[in-house]
Image: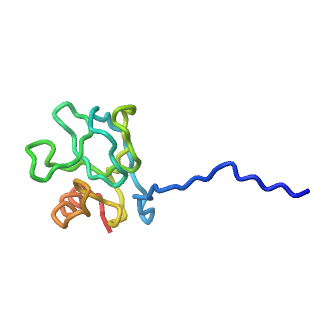
Amino acid sequence: MAFNANLGTQSFKEVTVIDYTHPPVVLDFAVATGQGELSPGTVVALNEAGAVVPYDPEGTSPVNEPVGILITRIDTENEDVAPVLVHGCAVRKHVTVKGNPVDDQTVRKLREKQIYVR
């Protein structure tokens, strides 16, 4: 007798933000709570307390200065540390600013910090 049970399915929607053509440097930063879910590829800055928040190019200092790119999905209600790409290469199609594709000005700012979006 043949037995073929399907107990469930999974679909993975995560993306690989890091382009491994250059060795990445990823550091863990404290993350500010109460921001909901942050997606991988989100360009991030540090707030006044030194915690990760989404980069805001129209915001005031320090949130208008990117420090890196978030490499995994973070639920800020349940997690307090975020892995951030601070040096290396990132895949441009996965990098976002405020939920939109990364713009050229942000790419230049990231390049100044030796984060190359290609």
The residue lying at 87 percent from left, 58 percent from top is 2
Is 13 situated above or below 47?
below
Residue 53 in percent (x, y) is at 24, 41
- For this orientation, the residue located farthest to the right is 1
Residue 9 in percent (x, y) is at 61, 53
Residue 12 in percent (x, y) is at 52, 55
Q: Relative to the observer, which residue lies in front, 96 or 2?
A: 2
The residue lying at 9 percent from left, 52 percent from top is 58
How is colour applied across the structure in the image? Answer: rainbow
- For this orientation, the residue located farthest to the front is 1
Residue 82 in percent (x, y) is at 36, 40
The residue lying at 41 percent from left, 48 percent from top is 72
Q: How many numbered marks, from 0 up?
A: 0
* Relative to 27, 106 lies left or right: left
Q: Quadrant of the N terminus?
A: bottom right
Name the image quarter holding residue 35. top left
Is 48 situated above or below 37?
above
Is 31 situated above or below 64?
above
Q: Quadrant of the C terminus?
A: bottom left
The residue lying at 45 percent from left, 62 percent from top is 20
Is 63 situated above or below 81?
below
